Image (cartoon, rainbow, N blue to C red):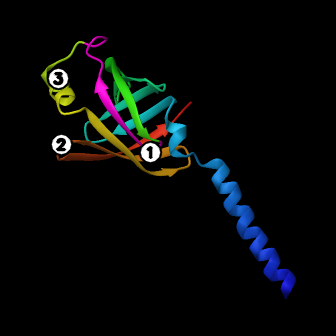
Amino acid sequence: MKSIFFLSIFLLFSKNENCSKNSLKCSDFKSGKFELVNSKSKRKYIIKRNSEFQTEDTYALESGKKISGPKIFKIRWINDCEYNLMIDTIKNKCDETDLYMNSKGGLNVKIIKVENNCATLITSLEDMKVESKLCKIK
């Protein structure tokens, strides 16, 4: 009976250890290549990120045709799970929306959950909040 109990405990901890090895953590989203799909707008964003900049290319979800980009953002990490994005006004052609966003401090992004290779994000600008899913592809 004791051996069954200890075997159960061992298997329980072994399984949790294996799961954590396969799943990413917030800090794994600081650099790499990512995909974000917005089914409402029918767009897909391919994002390349390093510690200082984020570059986004926008594609039509159905055709896969590139719509715009690259759009370059300066990224400032607040902690491993939260960062701010500001349009780089030197490297981009900026419209009124971009300038307005920057005047309000840019986009604040919080990683609220990480599962496997994807993170659930809450992106906010003033009182507007949008939830999305960002998946690491490289």
Is 75 on the left-hand or right-hand side of 116?
Answer: left
Query: Foreground residue, 13 or 61?
Result: 13
Q: Amino acid at mark 1?
A: Cys
Query: What residue does disc 2 label?
Result: 126
Query: Foreground residue, 10 or 137?
Result: 10
- Please tell me which of labels 1 and 2 falls first in the chain: 1
Task: Relative to 104, say whether 91 is above or below.
Answer: above
Mark seen at residue 99? 3
Circle 3 — which element?
helix
Quarter holding the C terminus?
top right
Residue 21 location, x and y as percent? 67, 49
Residue 107 location, x and y as percent? 27, 35
Is 6 on the left-hand or right-hand side of 97?
Answer: right
Query: Foreground residue, 40 or 129?
Result: 129
> How far is the residue under mark 3 from the one under mark 1?
25 Å
Residue 61 in sight from this viewpoint: no
> How far is the residue under mark 1 from the one under mark 2?
19 Å
Query: What's drawn in magenta, residue-wise?
Result: 80-92
Tally the marks: 3
Is 28 on the left-hand or right-hand side of 56?
Answer: right
Query: Do the CB atoms of the residues marked 1 and 2 lie less than 8 Å apart?
Result: no
Residue 18 location, x and y as percent? 70, 55
- Please tell me which of labels 2 and 3 falls first in the chain: 3
> For residue 57, which quarter of the picture?
top left
Q: Amino acid at mark 3?
A: Leu
Circle 1 — which element?
loop
Residue at image point 33% right, 34% down: 84
